[in-house]
Image: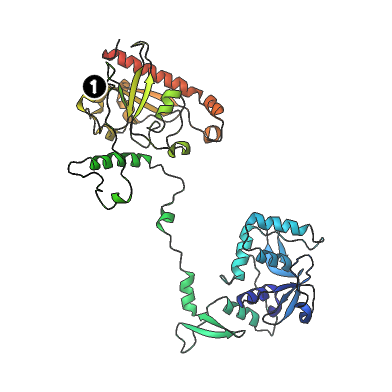
Amino acid sequence: MSNSDPLVLLRTSLAASKPPHLTTSSDPAEAVANTTDSFVEATHLYFPYPTPKSVPLDSTTRFTSTTPDTVQVDLRSIFFAWVKKDVTVPEYIASAQELDQQLPDGQKIRNLVFVERLELMTWLEGATEESEYIKPLEDAPGTDGAAVKAAEIAGGAGVPPQPGTGQTATQQAGGRPVRVIDARLQTIYDGERSMLDHNSVLRGIKPTDFSHVRKHAELFLGKRRSAPGARPGQPQSKTLATRPIPAPAKPIQSNVNSKRSDPIVLLSPSASSLLRMSNIKSFLDQGLYVPADHPILSSQMTPNILHVTRTLPSLSPKPYRFILVDSPDQFKPEYWSRVVAVFTTGQTWQFRGYKWREPQQLFENVLGMYVGEKGQPIPNEIKGWGSAVRKFELERWDERGHGPSVDQEVRQNRRWRDRETVEELWRTLEGHMRGKGDWKR
């Protein structure tokens, strides 16, 4: 019968804030005096509401567990899951295993998986009226399902509006006033969905690297700070006043103690470029490639200018110091005569601020370099520019073999072809500089 169903009794008593207690007595009159907190000693569960009743803990309930096999869960396991509803999953499993060691065979705790526990807690708290894990209650003939109706009222289920009460009404359930919601209003509530804040909405399926945006912002903020008429320490706007403005990038300067100027290499600012300011130095210096958006690099501050020293034997025994930048915004007109190479991905917007904006004219004066991933097609723009742009390939990055958890020596061994590519790149650049004649001994 519905008024003696363990699940209905448990839900009703919890809704009335009169939770049941473990006891060693089957007599409701003696259950309070024999209350215990031990699942090992207890034999019954005493319900003080709506009518005092003691139910055996090994009673079968209508809750069905399907993992690992389909069984109807006993009352002991149901109440144990409710007692442990606020603990973590590992703690719940550990407590169940510890209790199983003390319980005799046939009284073991049924370990409910996370989804089953969630469905059970939601139903017991009255947040939902049905569950796929709970079989419908079949009242015996002659009963009116009073216990079920009491549980629905206590759980906040909607009922038709009563005359003269408007949208809501107040009833008495077990001597306690209960707010009853209009069925039409409850239907509206059921169709609502939780609103998300902007952080939840903008969160994607993978992290996005915005380092190139920060890099360009520093250049623009530096220009504004150094603009004529701006007083030192005075913010340009209310937005900029909330955080310190980064110092403007220093213009490229040649070594005053040297008789020759430093050659300049321009990188592509495109986010699709394999070589950017964050990883170009380790690639050219150590012959080791790491993706520019890798977590071990994204946590570091990306500089606006880098220096790489390299000896070119056919030109001079003295090492050359190459200047690496990805934007000519800080260039003076005479700097363009020192540009020896340009890394490109085939996107012509890269050349908008260049002295030579047309690719054909640009690569007549400087060496073009395209670095792509092995096995990937070369862009049609790169092919159209012909031999003026030299092409290089890098092995595909495999996080499982090159991730931060892999030893540095192992990672270098697996990227041994990077060194071969770097040496070929330097030989090509050395030959180009030798052909121009301005960089000879």
Q: Is residue 67 visible?
A: no
Image point 52% across, 81% down: which residue? Answer: 180
- The answer to which image quadrant residue 22 occupies is bottom right
Q: Is residue 358 visible to the viewer in this orientation of the structure?
A: yes
| The image quarter in which residue 261 lies | top left
Place of residue 171 in the rendered image (x, y in percent of width and height, measured from the top left): 55, 85
Residue 44: x and y in percent read 77, 72
Q: Classify the position of the C terminus by image quarter.
A: top left
Give the quarter of the figure containing the N terminus: bottom right
Classify mark 1: residues with Cα within 10 Å, few (<14), some (14-19) or many (20+): few
Mark 1 belongs to which amino acid? Ser
Determine which residue is flagged by label 1: 337
Depth check, front residue: 358 or 241: 241
Q: Residue at x 46, y 64 (%)?
A: 194
Vertical side of 79 occupied by 165: above or below: below
* Residue sitting farthest toward the left: 229
Q: 243 or 19: which is nearer to us? A: 243
Horizontal and vertical percent position of residue 97: 73, 56
Q: Residue furthest front?
A: 232
- Residue 59 higher or lower than 341, as above or below: below
Q: How many marks?
A: 1
Pick the residue in front: 75 or 266.
266
Vertical order, 303 against 61 (above or below): above
In the image, what residue occupies the spot 37% across and 14% down?
A: 312
Frontmost residue, 28 versus 255: 255
Provide the secondary structure element on which disc 1 rests. Answer: helix
Of all residues shown, which one is farthest toward the right? 104
Residue 219 placement (x, y as % from top left): 28, 38
- Please give the name of the residue rendered at 78% of the width and 75% of the height, measured from the top-left corner: 34
| Color scheme of the displayed model | rainbow
Above or below residue 201? Residue 161 is below
